[in-house]
Image (spheres, grey):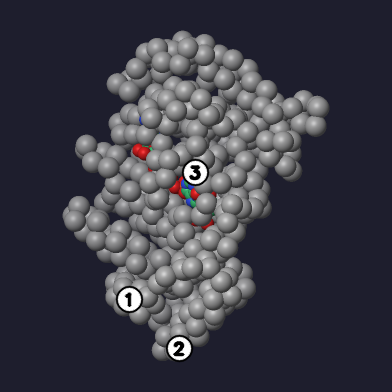
Amino acid sequence: MAVDLLLGLQWGDEGKGKIVDVLTSNYNIIARFQGGPNAGHTLVFNGKKHVLHTIPSGIFHDDATNLVGNGVVIDPVIFKKELDKLEEQGVDYRKSLLISRKAHIILPTHRLLDAASEAAKGKAKIGSTLKGIGPTYMDKTGRNGIRVGDLELSDWKTRYRNLADKHESMISYYNVDIEYDLADLETEFFEAIKVLKSLKFIDSEEYIYQAQKSGQTILAEGAQGSLLDIDFGTYPFVTSSNTTAAGACTGLGVSPNKIGEVFGIFKAYTTRVGSGPFPTELFDKDGETMGRVGNEFGATTGRSRRCGWLDLVALKYACQVNGVTQLMMMKGDVLSGFKTLKVCTAYKYKGEEIYHLPYNIEPENVEPIYTEFNGWAEDLTAMSDAAQLPKALNEYIDFLEKELEIPITIVSVGPDRKQTIFRGELVS
Ligand code: GDP
Ligand code: IMO
Ligand code: MG
């Protein structure tokens, strides 16, 4: 069987966790392939909210296997906290949660290095979640990292010490004021490592291969979004992994010709948390309304998210880079009550009108050109059928489908699992 992908098409927080949870009943295996605890994926069902960071969003379904793939970076301390929360909810994760031996481990000093690097950048800071993501991927590509499989080797603590010592000298190189007590951090870290070691480590590429061969269905759950991709995002204001479709191949060991459907997920407007350019960002009452009604606060850091109109130029680019086959539009309910809606359909770039994402989208280079739409007043949150959707919303959807040449198969009208409207049969 082919592996289907679910990817965020904007700057993250599109609602991936919710949709993976909704789709899990169609799949045997849910697999994360990149990122780490910088992600915050929110699921709401039975009146309860759950936030996952590293653990795949299929974990609440008894029948699904959840795999943390080789492309993911794991912070054992955060991972343990996630497990504790699952235990409180009575989730029996022991039989359903698998971890790739090739996934890299975030050390306490990786987190400190992240903080030191950001502090040293001053105003140019990336706005990292400070979870140690950048430094851990740097050690991975620099061939210095410690992997989950290393925990099974007798000398791993020596390797840990050497790397942590090196990190400490790098921290002092930054010459910034960072207070920490490494001994304390290490006590917590080694306790968490014990818990991690009690889970099932596997050679995940072999597992995925055999699962595909035996006809099991697999959904790969992206983290972050295409505009945060290390290659295709708004560099340097990006994360340190490939968040786009190709990342699923390297992050799981799946060959490109075994990728099936590519579900692309986007908000009916745009948000961004952290620094970096955002052409359609709003600094007025409309932006404030989106943030308030959409409850736009980061699920990992609690920071307020910047809000703006939908950017179709950027969305088209993300669809191209990922080969999206079906779209899912989230948070349509948040736009109820706006008299007029705007969609950015082109950029003014160096005096010219352009329709693609150029190298530099800083405000001094790019000005959005908008197409306006009538809004709708109806509250969507209690709707459950596509036939109930207001005419103006259908016009908005029709326009996007026509421009993007991809069907929108799900419209989400609230955070709950049940607030999900299917527009026809979902192909998977
Ligand atoms: P993820 O990182 O892509 O999984 O998304 P987050 O969980 O970080 O952010 C999405 C936020 O929007 C969460 O608070 C969700 O509960 C919420 N959400 C998801 N879909 C909808 C929707 O259709 N309407 C509204 N109002 N909220 C939604
Ligand atoms: P999910 O999976 C939104 C952003 C940070 C920062 C930049 C780099 O929940 O959609 P990093 O910690 O990776 O070094 O931060 O990327 N960022 C996210 N923004 N959603 C996320 O994940 C994010 N993960 C990282 O805010 O701008
Ligand atoms: Mg999130």
Of 269 and 177, the residue lying toward us: 177
Identified at 26% across, 51% down, the residue is: 62
Amino acid type of the residue that numbered disc 2 sits on in the rendered structure: Thr
Amino acid type of the residue that numbered disc 3 sits on in the rendered structure: Val
Q: Which mark is residue 184?
A: 1
Of 406 and 9, the residue lying toward us: 9
Q: Which mark is residue 158?
A: 2
10 Å crowding of disc 2: few (<14), some (14-19), many (20+): few
Whether the residue carrying mark 3 lies under 8 Å from ligand 2 is answered with yes
> Residue 77: where, in percent of width, then height?
34, 67
Task: Identify the mark nearer the N-term, 3 or 1.
Answer: 1
Badge 2 element: helix
The relative height of residue 423 versus residue 241 in the rendered view (above or below) is above
Badge 1 element: helix
- Mark yes or no: residue 81 visible: yes
Q: Which mark is residue 273?
A: 3
The quadrant where residue 142 appears: bottom right
